[in-house]
Image (cartoon, grey):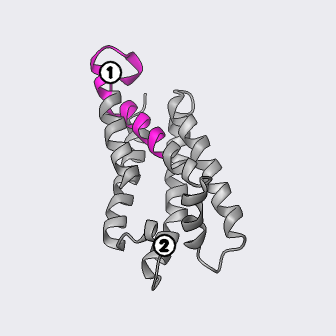
Amino acid sequence: MAPLITLLLGSAGARAAGALGVDDLDSWPRAIAVGLAAMFTLTGVAHFAPPLRRPLIAIVPPALPAPALLVSLTGVLELLGAAGLLLPATRVAAAACLLVLMLVMFPANVYAAAMPDPPAAMATRLPRRTAEELLYLGAALVVILGAG
């Protein structure tokens, strides 16, 4: 729920700043890019914070090698994507890359939902998690299609 709140509040706050005259935030796609950057900063840091990292490693499907390395790699990619969203020159590419990353990582959420005893931090039911994922993907699409 924290990523969703971060996306919504970050986007709304950025759009409010745009309404107050911040030129680069004078449209919803640009404001949503800031919200996504905040969200991916939050989730990227979670890949390295010990109490949050363990559940992420636990939900890596067993067919994939080196779960800890994959969690570190995806965390780095999320942080790089967040930075890229904040730069006009890289905003669209970052949003597109993050969209692909979200699609690639979604099977871990499916796996977590099917676990008999998932980590508490990952115990979100699949329909809710899918709805949130669709919102995140939609936000990335708004940035991709509306950036300018």
Quadrant for the C terminus, please: top left
Residue 127 position (above or below residue 137):
below
Which amino acid type corresponds to the residue marked 2 in the rendered image?
A: Pro
SS category of the residue bearing label 2: loop
Left/right of residue 57 with respect to residue 30 in the rendered view: right
Image coordinates for residue 104, horizontal then vertical, percent = 55, 63
Image coordinates for residue 71, horizontal then vertical, percent = 63, 61
Image coordinates for residue 144, horizontal then vertical, percent = 44, 41
Q: Can you identify the residue that label 2 sits on?
A: 119
Residue 36 lies in the magenta-colored region: yes
Earlier in the chain: of badge 2 and badge 1, it is 1
Residue 144 position (above or below residue 126):
above
SS category of the residue bearing label 1: helix
**Picture quarter containing residue 13?**
top left
User: Magenta residues: mostly which secondary structure?
Assistant: helix
**Residue shown at 49% from the left, 77% from the top:** 111
Q: Residue furthest bottom?
A: 116
Which amino acid type corresponds to the residue marked 1 in the rendered image?
A: Gly
What residue span does the magenta drawing correspond to? 15-39
Q: Can you identify the residue that label 1 sits on?
A: 18
Left/right of residue 54 with respect to residue 22 in the rendered view: right
Left/right of residue 71 with respect to residue 38 in the rendered view: right
